[in-house]
C-alpha cells in the first residue's frame, strides 16, 4: 500500500517518546475543535474507512469536498478541516492542525518558551547553546537555522526569487518583498502607542519611540541638534556641508538623500506608483499620496494651539497662524 494507506503518525512529534505511543495529535484534542462531540482522538487505520474525518480534525482521503472548500489536491489526500491546505502524509496534516488549535505542547527547558512542533524547540535551543551547525561554503559564516543559511546564500548568488506584482522589483527575502508592497498599498500596520503615528516597518516605529523617551544620542557638532539615529545625523550634516552625493543621471541635479533622488527620477520616467483606492488618482511621492487620502477620510491632523481649529495640510496651519500674529 502507498503512503496514505498508513494510518499511524509514529513519525510525528509528541511530548513523550516510546515504541508503544498511541497515535494522536500534538495538542491532544479531537473533534470537539471542529464542532463534534468530545472524545479521545483516533486515527483511521484506512484512508477509505470511517466517517471521512478522524479525531485530529484532518479529513480522510475519501472525504473529498466534505471537508469543505475545494477538497484535497491530487497526491495530497489529507486535508485540513479548518482551511483548504492538503498534505501527502497524515502526520504533516496533524502538525499543521496545531496552527489552528493554538496548542504549543513543546517547551524549551532553558527559558520555558513553548512551540507547536518539537523541531522548533530544537532550533530555538541553539540560541541558548550558541550552536551554529549551518556554515556558508563561500564565506564561512555560520547559522543556527538552515533557512537562515539559505537566505544568506542569496547575497553571494544574487538570487532574488520574491518579486513585486505591482512594479516587478525583486527581493532576496520574502519579508523584504512584503515591506516593499506597503509602498504601493500605503499600509502602515505599526502604530506608536504614545501618539498613534503609524509606520510601514516595525524598525521605524522602534526608532520613532525614541522621540518620546528623549533618547537622542547622536549630536551635531555644528549646531547641537540631536538625533535618535546615526543615519539621521549623517543626513543632517549635509545641511552644513552642502554635500549632495546623489546625482540624477538624466539631468544632473544632485540631492542630499537617496530617497529625494528616487522621487525626482519619477519626473523623467512618469512613474506614479502610489494610487488612491478611492478615486484612482496616482502620485509620484508617498507623501503626496498620504496627503491626498485625507480628502476622502476627512482627517485634519494639524491643529492650531491658539484656537483649536484643525487643518488637513501643515501649510494651511502655517497660513492660519498668521491670523493670530504668529510668523
Image (cartoon, rainbow, N blue to C red):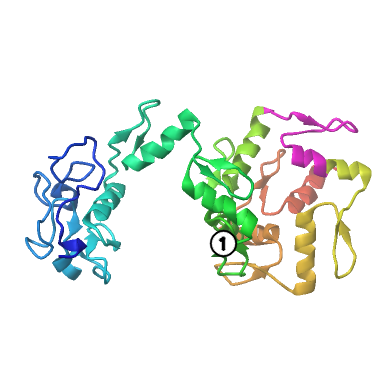
Nearer to the camera, 323 or 62: 62
Q: Residues within 10 Å of mark 1 (few under 14, many from 20)?
A: some
Residue 221 left/right relative to 147: right
Magenta segment: 214-235
Looking at the image, which residue is at 85% across and 64% down? 248
Which part of the image, by quadrant, shows the C terminus? top right
Drawn side of residue 277 relative to residue 229, left or right = left
Residue 26 placement (x, y as % from top left): 23, 42
Q: Position of residue 72 (x, y in %)?
A: 24, 68
Q: Looking at this view, is 39 or 195 the one in front?
A: 39
**x and y percent of residue 303 in the render?**
67, 44
Q: Is residue 11 visible?
A: yes
- The residue that appears at 67% across and 59% down in the rendered structure is 286
Between residue 52 and residue 280, name the one nearer to us: 52
How many numbered marks appear? 1
Question: Residue under circle 1?
Answer: 185
Residue 164 colored in magenta in the image: no
Report the residue at 75% width, 37% height from top: 230
Above or below, 180 relative to 24:
below
Report the residue that reaches farthest toward the left: 50
| Residue 151 or residue 174, whichever sits in front | 151
Q: Circle 1 — which element?
A: helix
Q: Residue 224: x, y in percent?
A: 85, 30
In the picture, which quadrant includes the N terminus? bottom left
| 100 horizontally vs 257: left or right | left
Q: Is residue 226 magenta?
A: yes
Amino acid at each position: 500500500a502507498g503512503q496514505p494507506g498508513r494510518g499511524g503518525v509514529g513519525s510525528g512529534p509528541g511530548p513523550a517518546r516510546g515504541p508503544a505511543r498511541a497515535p494522536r495529535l500534538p495538542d491532544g484534542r479531537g473533534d470537539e475543535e471542529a464542532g463534534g462531540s468530545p472524545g479521545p482522538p483516533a486515527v483511521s487505520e484506512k484512508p477509505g474507512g470511517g466517517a471521512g474525518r478522524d479525531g485530529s480534525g484532518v479529513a480522510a482521503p475519501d472525504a473529498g469536498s466534505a471537508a469543505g472548500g475545494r477538497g484535497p489536491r491530487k497526491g495530497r489526500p489529507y486535508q485540513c478541516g479548518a482551511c483548504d491546505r492538503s498534505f501527502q502524509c497524515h502526520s504533516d496534516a496533524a502538525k499543521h492542525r496545531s496552527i489552528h488549535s493554538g496548542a504549543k505542547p513543546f517547551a524549551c527547558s532553558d527559558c520555558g518558551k513553548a512551540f507547536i512542533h518539537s523541531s522548533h524547540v530544537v532550533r530555538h535551543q541553539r540560541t541558548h547553546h550558541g550552536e551554529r551547525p549551518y556554515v556558508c561554503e563561500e564565506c564561512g559564516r555560520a547559522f543556527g537555522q538552515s533557512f537562515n543559511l539559505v537566505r544568506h546564500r542569496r547575497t553571494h548568488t544574487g538570487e532574488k526569487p520574491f518579486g513585486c506584482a505591482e512594479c516587478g522589483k525583486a527581493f532576496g527575502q520574502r519579508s523584504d518583498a512584503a515591506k516593499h508592497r506597503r509602498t504601493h498599498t500605503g499600509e502602515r500596520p505599526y502604530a506608536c502607542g504614545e501618539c498613534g503615528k503609524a509606520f510601514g516597518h516595525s524598525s521605524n516605529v522602534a526608532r520613532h519611540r525614541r522621540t518620546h523617551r528623549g533618547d537622542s544620542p547622536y549630536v551635531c557638532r555644528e549646531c547641537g541638534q540631536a538625533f535618535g539615529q546615526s543615519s539621521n545625523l549623517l543626513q543632517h550634516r549635509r545641511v552644513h556641508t552642502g554635500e549632495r552625493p546623489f546625482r540624477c543621471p538624466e539631468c544632473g541635479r544632485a540631492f542630499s538623500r537617496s530617497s529625494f533622488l528616487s522621487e525626482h527620477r519619477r519626473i523623467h520616467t512618469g512613474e506614479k506608483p502610489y494610487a488612491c483606492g478611492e478615486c484612482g488618482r496616482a502620485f509620484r511621492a508617498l507623501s503626496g499620496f498620504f496627503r491626498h487620502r485625507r480628502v476622502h477620510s476627512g482627517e485634519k491632523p494639524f491643529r492650531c494651539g491658539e484656537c483649536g481649529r484643525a487643518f488637513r495640510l501643515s501649510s494651511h496651519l502655517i497660513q492660519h497662524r498668521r491670523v493670530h500674529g504668529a510668523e
